[in-house]
Image: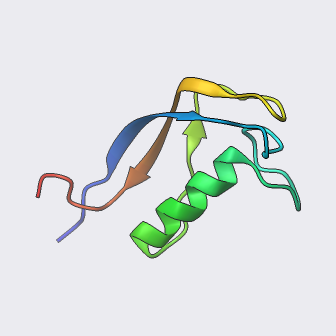
Amino acid sequence: MDKSINRVLCTVMYHGAHYSGWQVQDDKPSIQSTIQSVLGRMHHHPVKIAGSGRTDAGVHAFGQCFHFDTDLNLSE
């Protein structure tokens, strides 16, 4: 039986003072890499997210949206 793919929309807020911005950066902490790491641990495999926009280093956000696809059954 094939698993269906669900697209999940999330809205987050963050204090970006200690991050290099939204987008993944080599050897620097970013909001995107932090969220992907947490989602990967929850799903037991890598998860890529797509943001609706990006913030620069040190910038905070309120209402930042992103989505990701998952094969988890979200109805249970």
Q: Residue at x 72, y 37 (%)?
A: 16
Q: Position of residue 50 (x, y in %)?
A: 58, 40
Q: Residue at x 32, y 60 (%)?
A: 71
Indicate the quadrant containing the N terminus: top left, top right, bottom left or bottom right: bottom left
Q: Is 9 on the left or on the right of 61, as rendered? A: left
The colour scheme of the drawn protein is rainbow
Q: Is 52 on the left or on the right of 59, as rendered? A: left
Occupied quadrant, residue 10: top left
Q: Position of residue 52 (x, y in %)?
A: 58, 27
Foreground residue, 40 or 31? 31
Q: Is 21 on the left or on the right of 76, as rendered? A: right
Q: Is 51 on the left or on the right of 76, as rendered? A: right
On screen, residue 13 above or below 49: above
Occupied quadrant, residue 51: top right
Query: In the current view of this chain or complex, which residue is farthest to the bottom?
Result: 44
Q: Position of residue 55 (x, y in %)?
A: 74, 28
On screen, residue 67 above or below 54: below
Count of number-bearing discs: 0
Q: Residue at x 24, y 64 (%)?
A: 3
On screen, residue 49 above or below 60: below
Occupied quadrant, residue 13: top right
Indicate the quadrant containing the C terminus: top left, top right, bottom left or bottom right: bottom left
Q: Residue at x 57, y 53 (%)?
A: 35
Q: Position of residue 65 (x, y in %)?
A: 51, 29
Query: In the current view of this chain or complex, which residue is farthest to the left?
Result: 76
